[in-house]
C-alpha cells in the first residue's frame, strides 16, 4: 500500500546484512558497528560534514517503512539506537544526538528498507544547512571500529 521500491529492487541493506558484496552497494562489511539476530547498525556511506559518525540501525528482516514494521521490531531497533547514542557521546564527545527516520519519497526516504539514523550533534553544527557527501570506505571503517570499541563499554537496562 505504501511501498515505493521498484519491482526489480535490490535492497542494499539486505545485501550488506547477508554479507553479499555488489558494486551497486556502497556500504561495506567494515561499516558494521553492531549486529545481532534482530538488527544491524552500520556507519552510513553518506556523512554530514560537521557530524561524522552518522550510523544507521535497520532490522535484519526487510520491511520498507514504518507502515510495514512490526511493533515487535521497534524495541530491538530502539535498544540498539540507545546504545549507539550513548556510545557516540563517549566516542565523539558530542553535545547531543539526533535520531531520524524517513518514510516514502516525500518523507525523504531514499533506500527502501526501514532504517533509523543516529547522528552525533554539536552546538552550532549547521546540520540542517549542510548536505551529506559520500565518505571514503577507509574513513568509515575507522569510525566503525571506534564505535565498536566504545559499544563494548556501554550497558543499558532492560
Image: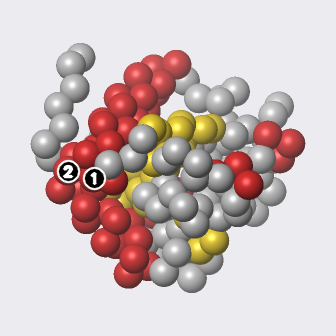
Q: Which residue is mark 1?
A: 91
- Rendered residue at 21%/19% (across/down): 157
- Rendered residue at 69%/27% (across/down): 67
Against 97, is 23 above or below? below
**Residue 61 shows up from this direction:** no
Disc 1 secondary structure class: helix
Disc 2 secondary structure class: helix
- Rendered residue at 49%/47% (across/down): 122
Against 126, is 78 above or below? above
* Residue sitting nearer the eye, 85 or 105: 85
Q: Which residue is mark 2?
A: 150
Q: Quadrant of the C terminus?
A: top left
Measured from the top left, where is residue 10 in percent x and y? 65, 64
Against 74, is 81 above or below? below
* Residue sitting nearer the eye, 18 or 36: 36
Measured from the top left, where is residue 58 in percent x and y? 48, 44
Along the horizontal axis of the image, is 25 left or right of 77? right
- Rendered residue at 59%/29% (across/down): 69
Against 4, is 9 above or below? below
Residues under numbered marks 1 and 2 in contact, where contact means CB atoms less than 8 Å apart: yes
Measured from the top left, where is residue 26 in percent x and y? 55, 73
Q: Residue 85 appears in which quarter of the rendering?
A: top left
Label 1 to label 2: alpha-carbon separation:
7 Å
Amino acid at each position: 500500500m505504501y511501498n515505493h521500491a521498484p519491482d526489480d529492487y535490490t535492497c542494499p541493506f539486505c545485501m550488506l546484512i547477508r554479507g553479499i558484496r555488489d558494486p551497486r552497494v556502497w556500504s561495506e562489511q567494515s561499516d558494521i558497528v553492531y549486529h545481532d539476530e534482530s538488527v544491524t547498525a552500520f556507519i552510513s556511506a553518506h556523512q554530514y560534514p560537521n557530524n561524522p559518525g552518522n550510523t544507521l540501525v535497520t532490522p535484519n528482516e526487510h520491511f520498507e517503512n514504518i507502515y510495514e514494521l512490526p511493533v515487535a521490531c521497534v524495541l530491538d531497533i530502539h535498544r540498539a539506537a540507545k546504545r549507539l547514542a550513548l556510545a557516540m557521546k563517549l566516542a565523539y564527545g558530542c553535545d547531543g544526538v539526533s535520531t531520524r527516520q524517513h518514510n516514502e519519497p516525500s518523507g525523504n526516504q531514499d533506500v527502501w528498507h526501514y532504517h533509523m539514523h543516529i547522528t552525533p550533534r554539536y552546538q552550532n553544527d549547521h546540520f540542517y544547512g549542510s548536505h551529506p557527501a559520500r565518505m571514503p570506505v577507509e574513513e568509515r571503517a575507522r569510525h566503525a571500529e571506534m564505535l565498536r570499541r566504545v559499544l563494548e563499554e556501554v550497558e543499558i537496562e532492560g
